[in-house]
Image: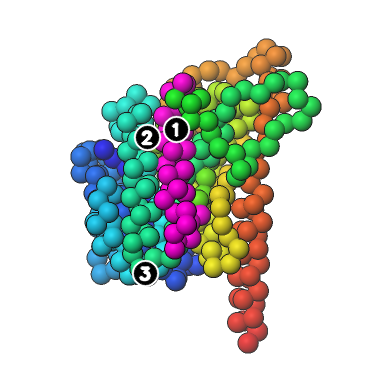
């Protein structure tokens, strides 16, 4: 059992991440089962770098994501927890299996329960996925306007099971489990739903989850639902949302910066992931029109407003200090 890269590995590099001096990475204990994978070995080396003397004010904490006591010990003393890891089975055909979806759901429940039990923890930022929002039964094609897909939308679990979209199913079930576990408890939870994460070196080091994300991608392109987001934007989204949790921030946030609208873009994306392009760009007029006029419209307005507001606050504070 291996793990997707954690955004927690990126956040400490952001200057605005100052308030958290100790960052647990709760899901690392299972990595050794497939530590021969190059991408996992690279991440282990990075963890060792952070382990030394609390580099950059960050300490690596090992914990068993299925053991609430282990998580409780890891979280002790922390004010906020970022649950960003995801389970991946490299032996699965798509990099993710039905069994992994069940495990990820249990892990989400245990992480939130551990947050609730840890007196110091008051906030939890949970990384979900845009896939937890986009997979639903088809709608009639005679609609005049596209249907908006935003933070209020949830993927249909039955649809995901019927179409073997295990990665989407896992993300949907895990996020719902986190919300159930946090309901009525003394813990503020927010979830971020990123699109397919991209960025320099990210795809090369994390091809397994990217391949799992792209299952059913042709349908997503046709419906206007395949989007990408740079890894730095995902990191900033986590930071900005966390900073705003003392105020009005709450609920779910969709995170993306580009929508794949042309078949040529999708082919290029597959090639960048080191995959053999599975379908050439469409040449017939009907296929081209299907991509040019998608049935759905993604909306990330909620996150955009929050990030813009936080940036203005940071800029104003900087100017105030400079003039003083």
Graded by Cα atoms within 10 Å as few (under 14), some (14 to 19) or many (20 or more), the crowding at tag 3 reads some
Quarter of the image with the C terminus is bottom right
Question: In what element is the residue under mark 1?
Answer: helix
Nearest the camera: 88 or 72?
72
Question: Looking at the picture, how far across and down is residue 228, in whole percent?
Answer: 55, 39
Question: Looking at the picture, how far across and down is residue 61, in whole percent?
Answer: 27, 60
User: Which label is found at residue 101?
Assistant: 2
For label 1, the residue is: 169
Name which of mark 3 and mark 1 comes first in the sequence. Answer: 3
- As drawn, the residue found furthest toward the top would be 284
For label 3, the residue is: 120
Mark 2 and mark 1 residues within 8 Å of each other at the beta carbon: yes
Q: Residue at x 34, y 43 (%)?
A: 106
Main secondary structure of the magenta stretch: helix
Graded by Cα atoms within 10 Å as few (under 14), some (14 to 19) or many (20 or more), the crowding at tag 1 reads many
Question: Looking at the picture, how far across and down is residue 153, in whole percent?
Answer: 59, 39
């Amino acid at each position: 059992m291996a793990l997707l890269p954690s955004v927690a590995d990126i956040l400490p590099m952001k200057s605005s991440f100052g308030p958290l001096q100790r960052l647990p990475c709760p899901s690392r204990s299972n990595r050794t089962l497939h530590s021969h994978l190059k991408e996992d070995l690279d991440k282990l080396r990075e963890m060792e770098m952070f382990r030394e003397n609390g580099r950059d004010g960050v300490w690596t904490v090992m914990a068993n994501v299925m053991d609430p006591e282990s998580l409780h010990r890891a979280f002790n003393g922390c004010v906020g927890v970022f649950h960003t890891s995801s389970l991946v089975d490299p032996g699965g055909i798509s990099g993710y299996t039905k069994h992994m979806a069940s495990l990820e759901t249990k892990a989400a429940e245990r992480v939130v329960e551990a947050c609730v039990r840890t007196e110091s923890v008051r906030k939890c930022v949970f990384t979900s996925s845009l896939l937890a929002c986009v997979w639903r039964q088809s709608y009639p094609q005679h609609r005049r306007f596209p249907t908006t897909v935003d933070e209020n939308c949830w993927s249909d679990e039955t649809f995901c099971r019927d179409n073997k979209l295990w990665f989407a199913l896992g993300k949907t079930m895990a996020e719902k489990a986190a919300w159930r576990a946090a309901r009525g408890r003394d813990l503020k939870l927010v979830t971020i739903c990123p699109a397919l994460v991209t960025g320099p070196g990210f795809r090369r080091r994390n091809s397994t989850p990217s391949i799992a994300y792209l299952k059913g991608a042709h349908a997503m392109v046709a419906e206007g639902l395949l989007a990408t987001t740079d890894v730095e934007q995902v990191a900033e989204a986590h930071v900005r949302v966390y900073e705003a949790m003392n105020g009005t921030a709450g609920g779910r946030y969709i995170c993306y910066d580009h929508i794949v609208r042309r078949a040529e873009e999708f082919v290029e994306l597959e090639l960048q992931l080191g995959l053999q392009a599975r379908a050439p760009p469409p040449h017939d007029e009907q296929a081209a029109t299907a991509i040019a006029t998608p049935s759905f419209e993604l909306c990330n307005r909620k996150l955009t407003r929050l990030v813009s507001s936080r940036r203005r606050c940071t800029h104003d504070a900087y100017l105030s200090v400079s003039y003083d």
